[in-house]
Amino acid sequence: MRERPPGRWPLIALLAGAAALAACDEEEEVAEDTPIVEVSRIGDIVWPPLAVREAGMAISEDPLAENNMVVLDMSGSMGEGGCSGDHRNRAEAAKEALFRWIAANPGDNIGLVSFASDGIALAVPLGRGEAHAERLVAEIEALIPGGGTPLASAMALGVEALERHAARQNGTGTYRLIVITDGEASSGESPRALVAEVAGNPANAIELHTIGFCIEGGHALNDPHAVFYADANSPEDLASGLEAVAGEAAAFDAGDISFEELTP
């Protein structure tokens, strides 16, 4: 089981520091090496963003729902046969793994962002239920590999969809962005800035997960400080990576947190 990226828990250190300061005598001097948190930074830890909160927005009936937004790479290279096992190509292997995973998680909200031969799109918004699952399967089945790898744009669509749904749940519940990709991003589409933005906000509840399918060497999303990353070199590895997604946070133990690692 992979450990939770340590960079995703700075809020705990911030709260611990605030409690310690409150307990101190008002006249006690602050040590010179104590980091100072400016009041202006309070606005940086608001999540979901105020911009996505709409007047009259319907509140979710399940405020503790688990929300999974899948970003599926169906670029041209997914039409190749490497790591595909008995499947015709990586695209078919990924589709089959997703179908099984969707069927195994009927209680979760699942959505889909894809980029394929017909471009990039929020193909299916977050939802659940039998009819929703059938729509997801149909959309995934219809995808034809082609085009480049606009990772940053696709991930941004997924993050925005999760944020809007989080506003309906008042920020409670679980939020995961799950990227399945077989290659590096196209020119100008590096996801590093988006990852830094999500992971750098201590209030942001979005977990970033990536399964690198048939990728040799490093990848921009293989960042142990911000992303749960797994390599998959077979259809079985891909299925196992998807099955492990929900288990990452469930296995997290607050007692394992090192406050020394969380502070600058």
Image (tube, grey):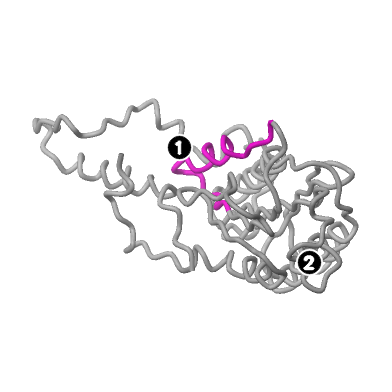
* Secondary structure of residue under mark 1: helix
Q: Which mark is residue 45?
A: 1
Residue 193: within the magenta? yes
Q: Is residue 57 visible?
A: no
Distance between the Cα atoms at labels 1 and 2? 39 Å
Q: Is residue 169 visible?
A: yes
Q: Which residues are magenta?
A: 188-208
Q: Nearer the viewer, mark 1 or mark 2?
A: 2
Residue wearing tag 2:
93
Q: Residues within 10 Å of mark 2 (few under 14, many from 20)?
A: many
Rendered residue at 27%/49% (across/down): 260
Find residue 196 and report its horizontal and vertical position in percent.
52, 38
Residue 50, by quadrant, is top right
Quarter that holds the C terminus: top left
- Does 171 sit above or below residue 192? below
Q: Amino acid at mark 1?
A: Ile
Which of disc 2 and disc 1 is earlier in sequence? Answer: 1
Rendered residue at 75%/49% (across/down): 113
Find residue 207 and report its horizontal and vertical position in percent.
55, 52
Residue 171: within the magenta? no
Query: Which residue is more in the foreground, 214 or 224?
Result: 214
Find residue 258 and report its horizontal and vertical position in percent.
30, 55
- Does 248 sit above or below residue 148? below
Q: Is residue 185 left or right of residue 195?
A: right
Rendered residue at 80%/55% (across/down): 78
